[in-house]
Image: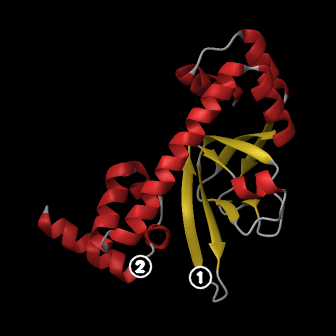
Amino acid sequence: MFELFKEYISQKTTLTEIEYAKIEAVCIYKKLRKRQYLLQEGDVWKYNAFITKGLVRFYSVDESGRENIVSFAKENWWTGDRASLLTGEPSKNNIDAIEDTELILITKTNFDRLCQEIPALNDMVNAIINKSFITSQNRIHAAISFTAEQKYLDFVQKYPDLSLRVPQAMIASYLGITPETLSRVRKETVKKH
């Protein structure tokens, strides 16, 4: 599992074998079965989590019991509740596996220490956070300005593999539309192309 993480890091920055050994020494390996929770609402999130295999969703459940999916994360992506991690407050969200998933977890304390000791890792992390911020801004813009069809086409264009791996009801939740609307949009899209 660490070899996949090492390969990911090596594509983004250059570290020494000693630096990789420091990282590997603090890695916690976790496997989730499909539908198993990584985080449940009310728990405090304490890790930086990197997915080596599989797919998870990050979501909340409203008073009526409806799931509101904020994001998905797949191989070579990071996941977790950043707000809970940084504030130490209980999470308002859940993370569970859509597919059998394997992850590497690093506690916040260890991760912060690694970023201090390994400047190249810190630079990589800051670049990832900046990219994530831009992605979030674009997602908010799409949510408030796009039509249902534009939201779906944008999702399929940005994440073609996810559109095949994620159940349609979950895609609808992520897009903020009903499954019925998504079904209609998909049929209309097929007719146009």
Q: Against 181, is 92 above or below?
A: above
Picture coordinates of residue 67 (x, y %)?
59, 76
Residue under pointer 2: 179
Name the residue: 61% across, 14% down.
14
Q: Quadrant of residue 30?
A: top right
| 159 on left or right of 121 | left
Picture coordinates of residue 178 (x, y %)?
42, 81
Frontmost of labels 1 and 2 is 1
Label 2, residues with CA under 10 Å away: few <14, some 14-19, many ≥20: some
Picture coordinates of residue 126 (x, y %)?
62, 34
Residue under pointer 1: 66
Mark 1 vs 2, N-terminal side: 1
The N terminus lies in quadrant: top right
Q: Can residue 81 be seen in this view?
A: no
Q: Which amino acid does label 1 sit on?
A: Arg
Q: Which amino acid does label 2 sit on?
A: Pro
User: Which one is nearer the viewer's eye here, 36 or 69?
Assistant: 69
Q: In which quarter of the image is residue 20?
A: top right
Q: Quick one: SS at disc 2?
A: helix
